[in-house]
Image (tube, rainbow, N blue to C red):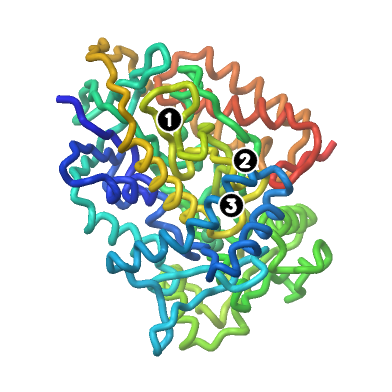
Amino acid sequence: MIYDYIIVGAGIAGLYAALNIPENKKVAVLSKEPLWECNTFYAQGGVATARDEKDINDHIEDTLKAGCGLCNKEAVEIMSQNSILVINDLINRGFEFDTDEEGNLLFTREAAHSRNRILHAGGDATGRLLHKFLIENCSHKVFESVEVADLLVEEGVCYGVTVKKEGKLKNIYGKNVFIASGGVGSLYEYHTNANTISADLQGICLEKGIELADMEFLQFHPTVFILSHRARKLLLTEALRGEGATVVDEKGRRFLFDYDSKGELASRDIVSRAIYDYKLKGHKVYLSFENFEEEFFRYRFPTIYKNFKELGFNVPRQKVPVSPAFHFAMGGIKTDLYGKVPGFENLYAIGEVACTGVHGANRLASNSLLEGLVFSRRAVEVALINNFEPKSKKFPVLREKLIKENDKDIKNELRRVMWEKVGIIRKREKLQSAFDFICESEKKDIGRFLKLRLLCAKEIVKSALARKESIGAHYIED
Ligand code: SIN
C-alpha cells in the first residue's frame, strides 16, 4: 500500500498537519514511543500570537530582535500574519485557551515580548492540553512505537521511510513525507526534551545530502530544575518570570541586573548566559516565587505546583534551585516558506526539526508552538495540490544494526561533551576537542542510531566552529 501522507512525529506540527489533511486521504502518523512522549506534551508557557491586526508588526519586530537580525524576515511575517488564523482555527474546533470570567482570552508575558501575547491553557499545561486535543481530533491512523531508521530517497525524490516496528525493519511508501520529529535534546546532558528527541532524522538528512541550516544556534532555557535523576529535566516556565518570579542568589540578590537592565525579562540567551556565568563564579541560583499568593500560584501554575510539591519543595514559599539546560534547536532541516525541503520532491519538514528561518540566532519565547501550527498548515496546503506522482519503486530493506553494545557509554559521553564543550559559552579549543571526540567515536563499532546522533552533533560543532563571532545563542569566548 502507498500512503498519501506519511507524517514522522506526533507533536504539534505532525498532528496539526494531520488535522488539516482531508479524511479521505490515506495518512500514517508515526510516533516513536507512546504518543505523549514528545516536546509538545511538556510545553508549559503557551503559544505566542499577535493579539490583533495592530499587534502583528510589534510581534514581528520582537521576533526579529530576539533573532539578532538573522531571521528570515519573510518567514517571520508569514508566521505572525497567520497567527490569529491558526489560533482562531483551534478555538473554532473547540480548543479552550484560558479566559477570564467574561470569556476574554488571557494573555501572559514572557521575556523579550514587548507586551502580553502568550495564550495558555490549563494554566501551565498548554502543551499537554493542546496535544490531547489534537489527538482526540485526529481522524487519521496514528501508529505508536514506530521508529524511523531511514528515508527512502533517490535522485531528489522521497518515496517513504524505513521503520522499526516490533523489532523488525520494513519500508513504508508514501506520496508525501512530512518530517515532524522535533529537535536534538538527547545530545545534551541537561535538557528539557522528551526522551524521543534524539536527532535521528537530522542525522539521516545529513547522510542523504539534505541540507541542515543554523545548527550552531541552540537555545538553553534559563530556569530548569536539573537535580532530578530523569534524563528530561523539569522546566520552570518563563511565564513565571513574566508574572513576577525573580532569579536570586544565595543571599536573595537579583543579580541578573548586573548583566542586563531588563533583568529577568531579558532575552533567553542573555538570562541563560548570566545564570551560567554566575554559577561558574561559585554562586547558587534560585527561582523565587515570593511575589505570588499561594492560591493564585496553585491555580495559575498547577503542573509546577504539583511537581515541585511532590519533590518536597514548599512552593511558592520556598525557592527552587535552577540552572540553564538545553531546550530548543533554532536550526534544522532547511525548508522553503511552505515547509518544503528544497531540491527534493514530496519531502517536507515542519516544527522544531525544520529551519524555516523564523528564529534566527535566538527564538522568541513561545514562538515554537506557533511556528509548528503555521508552517504545518502551509505544508499541507501545498502538498494537497502537489501533482507530482512518484514512480512506483521498491527499496531493499536496511540491513544495518540499529543499536550495538558500546553505544550507551559513547552516547553518555557525547552528552557530557556537548554540554561542556558545545554549550552556553563556547571556546574554539573546546569545540575542536568535541569535534575530535565525535570523529573518533564514529570510527568505533557502533549502531546506526548512534551514528546518526554523531552526524548531527558533528554538524552542530562544524557550524559553531564556522561562526567566528558571538551572536544570539552562539556565544564564543576566546
Ligand atoms: C516556557 O514555558 O518557558 C517555554 C516556552 C518556550 O519554550 O517558548
Q: Position of residue 342 (x, y in %)?
A: 50, 26
Callout 2 crowding tier (Cα within 10 Å): few <14, some 14–19, many ≥20? some
Label 3 sits on what residue type? Glu
- Cα separation, mark 2 vs mark 1, equals 19 Å
Dot 2: what SS?
helix
Name the mark on residue 77: 3
* Camera-nearest label, 3 or 2: 3
Q: Which residue bears the numbered disc 2? A: 419
Question: Would you say the residues marked 1 and 3 are in contact, meaning their CB atoms lie under 8 Å apart?
Answer: no
Name the quadrant of the C terminus.
Answer: top right
- Position of residue 478 relative to residue 322, above or below, is above
Question: Would you say the residues marked 2 and 1 are in contact, meaning their CB atoms lie under 8 Å apart?
Answer: no
Question: Which of the pair 423/11 is nearer the observer?
Answer: 11
Q: Where is residue 339 in the image (x, y as percent from the top left)?
A: 46, 38
Dot 3: what SS?
helix
- Position of residue 468 relative to residue 131, above or below, is above
Name the mark on residue 312: none
Q: Position of residue 36 (x, y in %)?
A: 31, 52
Q: Which residue bears the numbered disc 1? A: 200
Label 1 sits on what residue type? Asp
Q: Earlier in the sequence, mark 3 or mark 2?
A: 3
